[in-house]
Image (cartoon, rainbow, N blue to C red):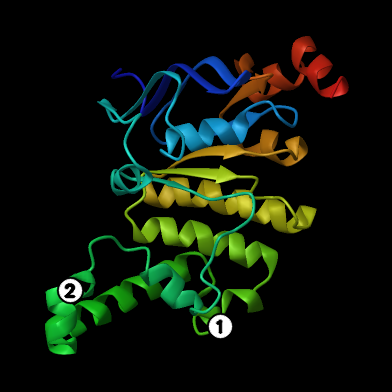
């Protein structure tokens, strides 16, 4: 505790006799961009689910900003500043792009039953301010021109950006991205990762990224962790990991 922004200590997650995670320990420094790789079924998404409260660990601890967070529900962890995306983006298809961002803001005045009964005179000004903030965030992600569209009208790349934009509406500090480059072209994926580095620089964000497209990931991350069969197989700088014989064997044997 203390050295790392996020620290995972001896975390295990069992589903009956299946050990999805088995004693994983790792640390993420504030302001870093860290990759998480491994063959299919190695436990990557399960680890994200434990960190963000979707799963309670069978064993171990998760610490964020020197506070223990394992066992908290996803909403409480989100309020602390940990935001995630999913392999399959989850948007509200009936809402506009702007509304999808606004809805992510926690503890809105209009959510109170009393304030809802009172009508716009109680929460109208708050809604206007949230809309302004939402548009500012969409501008940061260069998707403000699509504010009035439905998510179904966006490209795959723009939907992934929308998911990350919603995270900033919730005052994100650490963003967990689950395969941000999946389903997009090499050029678009490259631009997305450059954009991630720009967000790190401008907003001081920290990123933890699952990605299968290693040729892209390794160009942009500071550090890499490798999972295999629920255990931490290797870690290090990108060039160290990509040339690690154990990592090569794990991928070739997939």
- Say if residue 69 shows up in the picture: yes
Q: Which residue is mark 2?
A: 113
* Location of residue 107 in the rendering, given as x and y in whole percent from the top left corner: 23, 62
Residue 145 occupies which quadrant of the picture?
bottom right
Q: Is residue 102 above or below residue 163?
A: below
Residue shown at 19% from the left, 88% from the top: 120
The Cα–Cα distance between marks 2 and 1, rounded to whole angstroms, is 29 Å
Circle 1: element type: loop
Residue designated by label 1: 149
Residue 105's place in the image compared with 131, above or below, is: above
Residue 127 higher or lower than 69, as above or below? below
Residue 138 x/y as whole percent: 46, 70
The C terminus: image quadrant: top right
Say which element carries label 2.
helix
Q: Is residue 51 above or below residue 109?
A: above
* Residue at the extreme right: 252
């Amino acid at each position: 505790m203390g050295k790392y922004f996020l620290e995972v200590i001896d975390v295990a997650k069992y589903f009956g006799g299946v050990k999805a995670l088995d004693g994983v320990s790792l640390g993420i420094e504030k302001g870093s961009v860290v990759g998480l790789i491994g063959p299919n079924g190695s436990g990557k998404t399960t680890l994200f689910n434990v960190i963000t409260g979707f799963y309670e660990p069978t064993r171990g601890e998760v610490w964020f900003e020197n506070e223990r967070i394992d066992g908290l529900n996803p909403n409480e962890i989100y309020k602390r500043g940990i935001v995630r995306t999913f392999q399959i983006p989850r948007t509200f298809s009936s809402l506009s792009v702007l509304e999808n961002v606004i809805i992510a803001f926690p503890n809105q005045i209009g959510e109170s039953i009393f304030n809802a009964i009172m009508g716009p005179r109680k929460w109208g000004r708050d809604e206007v301010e949230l809309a302004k903030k939402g548009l500012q965030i969409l501008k940061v992600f260069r998707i403000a021109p699509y504010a009035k569209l439905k998510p179904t009208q966006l490209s795959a790349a723009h939907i992934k950006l929308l998911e990350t934009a919603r995270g900033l509406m919730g005052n994100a500090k650490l963003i967990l991205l689950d395969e941000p480059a999946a389903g997009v072209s090499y050029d678009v994926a490259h631009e997305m990762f450059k954009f991630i580095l720009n967000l790190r620089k401008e907003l001081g964000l920290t990123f933890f990224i699952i990605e299968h497209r290693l040729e892209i990931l390794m160009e942009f991350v500071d550090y890499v962790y490798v999972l295999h069969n629920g255990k931490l197989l290797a870690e290090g700088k990108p060039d160290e990991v990509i040339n690690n014989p154990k990592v090569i064997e794990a991928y070739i044997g997939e």
